[in-house]
């Protein structure tokens, strides 16, 4: 069980010039912006050994989200009041059969089914300093997802493992525009089949070669799941075909890592229309993403732990929609060309430990045509010092962004880039409690 409540002011976005010169600035027109958010989560889990070779699991959950937000993007725009009320609940059940099969090193058959539902409402108003002037949105909608899968694990010899599987998803739901009283039908997604297959070969102890191919799917979020006027055509699901080949290695007991190359091609990538009045989505077109992942973990002594992880990636539009032919070959917006992290943890004494770690990210285009400058690249360095005061209580001091690096999130509203600077150098303290029974 978890309950979360947050009340926050919202300083608003800045122009590029102000963001660099005065990153802690908030414009006067954002003075009444802010938000209150509540999130509740409850889940139940049941694992039952029906027999020595048969395991049954059931997971159920209920999530609620209540978000009230006031936001004004520029002096010329009206303040928006955005109210979100969502309830998500569902159940997931799996059955795993793992019998002893002659001539097989391992064999397992796993099947599962899940039913997940959302009951959501989205309302918006145009306000003047939190006083409502007019209502622009009043949507009530529900979405049901029915899914099932089956997967085999086959290990005919100790050095070879095969894992074929398939999943099928279908969707239905209802949508009502309560401002007009008009309903909308869900996009016709049909039954979405998602096969996959994976293989792992162990030519030498401590070295695993692996490869996998699979298909996944993505649909529009919230109102984007429905055929809302003025759109009269179904929004196709994004069918994502991807494959990966890699090597996992552990040449020494204290050193392990992974290196892999991957690709994914999406048939009709689904994209939210930023700040769209109806909350609709559209299809970017056929897209391709590929990259190289590297991970390394080393524990040379009981007190020292070193780790590094990085990914170099490329994302481009292969075939745009008919109305946007100029997007062919363009980079997908807000996709950095690399991400990287590394760190070292050291236990100086049984009661005192320290961690030093860094994050880095490449830049990206904030809009689809790639005609603006690129933004978003940064490197930050962070330090944590922790002292175990008692068996139950740990005191921690964190120094984040030690070098006072400037970095930001940037998006494009159609006429200009809007900037949200991240924290400068900052100090955090924490008291961690651990309860033993």
Image: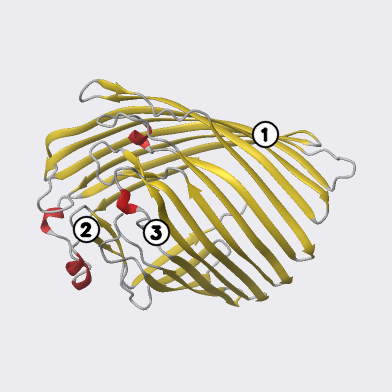
Q: Nearer the viewer, mark 2 or mark 3?
A: 3
Q: What element carries label 2?
A: loop
Q: Distance between the residues labelled 2 and 1?
A: 48 Å
At which x and y percent is residue 344?
55, 75
Q: In this view, does 206 lie to the left or right of 310?
A: right
Q: Name the residue under label 2.
A: 13
* Quarter of the rendering containing residue 158: bottom right
Between discs 2 and 1, the one toward the N terminus:
2
**What residue is shown at x 15% (from left), y 50% (from top)?**
32
Residue 252 lies left or right of residue 398; in this view the side is right
* Upstream in sequence: badge 2 or badge 3: 2
Q: Position of residue 178 (x, y in %)?
A: 24, 24
Q: Residue at x 50, y 49 (%)?
A: 265
Q: Residue at x 21, y 36 (%)?
A: 124
Look at the picture and state if 16 lies above or below 87: below
Please determine whether, in this image, residue 83 is positioned above or below residue 314: above
Q: Which mark is residue 335?
A: 3
Earlier along the polypeptide chain: callout 1 or callout 3? Answer: 1
Identify the image quadrant of residue 220. Answer: top left
Q: Mark 1 = which residue?
A: 111
């Amino acid at each position: 069980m978890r309950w979360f409540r947050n009340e926050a002011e919202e300083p608003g976005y800045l122009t590029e010039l102000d963001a660099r010169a005065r990153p802690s600035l908030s414009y006067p027109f954002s003075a009444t912006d802010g938000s209150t958010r509540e999130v509740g989560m409850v889940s139940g889990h049941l694992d039952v050994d029906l027999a020595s070779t048969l395991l049954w699991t059931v997971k159920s959950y209920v999530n609620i989200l209540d978000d009230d937000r006031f936001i004004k993007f520029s002096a010329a725009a009206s303040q928006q009041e955005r109210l979100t009320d969502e309830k998500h609940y569902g159940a997931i059940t799996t059955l795993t059969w793992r019998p002893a099969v002659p001539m097989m090193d391992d064999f397992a058959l796993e099947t599962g089914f899940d039913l997940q539902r959302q009951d959501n409402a989205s309302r918006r108003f145009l306000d003047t300093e939190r006083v409502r002037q007019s209502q622009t949105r009043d949507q009530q909608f529900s979405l049901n997802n029915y899914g099932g899968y089956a997967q085999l694990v086959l290990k005919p010899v100790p050095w070879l493992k095969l894992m074929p599987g398939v999943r099928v998803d279908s969707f239905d739901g209802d949508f009502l525009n309560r401002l007009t009283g008009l309903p909308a039908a869900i996009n016709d997604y049909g039954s979405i089949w998602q096969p996959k297959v994976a293989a792992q070969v162990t030519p030498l102890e401590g070295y695993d070669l692996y490869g996998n191919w699979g298909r996944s799917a993505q649909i529009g979020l919230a109102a984007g799941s429905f055929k809302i006027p003025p759109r009269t055509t179904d929004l196709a699901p994004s069918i994502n075909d991807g494959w990966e080949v890699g090597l996992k290695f552990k040449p020494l007991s204290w050193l392990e890592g992974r290196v892999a190359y991957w690709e994914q091609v999406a048939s009709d990538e689904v994209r939210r229309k930023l700040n769209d009045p109806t909350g609709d989505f559209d299809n970017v077109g056929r897209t391709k993403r590929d990259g190289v992942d590297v991970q390394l973990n080393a524990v040379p002594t009981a007190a020292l732990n070193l780790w590094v992880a990085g990914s170099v990636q490329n994302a481009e539009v292969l075939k745009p929609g008919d109305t946007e032919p100029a997007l062919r070959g363009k980079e997908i917006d807000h996709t950095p060309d690399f991400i990287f992290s590394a760190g070292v943890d050291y236990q100086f004494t049984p009661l005192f430990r320290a961690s030093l770690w860094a994050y880095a990210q490449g830049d990206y285009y904030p809009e689809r045509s790639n005609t603006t400058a690129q933004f978003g690249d940064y490197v930050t360095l962070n330090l944590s010092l922790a002292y175990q005061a008692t068996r139950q209580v740990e005191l921690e001091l964190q120094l984040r962004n030690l070098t006072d690096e400037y970095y930001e999130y940037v998006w494009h509203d159609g006429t200009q880039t809007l900037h949200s600077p991240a924290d400068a150098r900052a100090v955090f303290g924490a008291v961690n409690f651990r309860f033993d029974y």
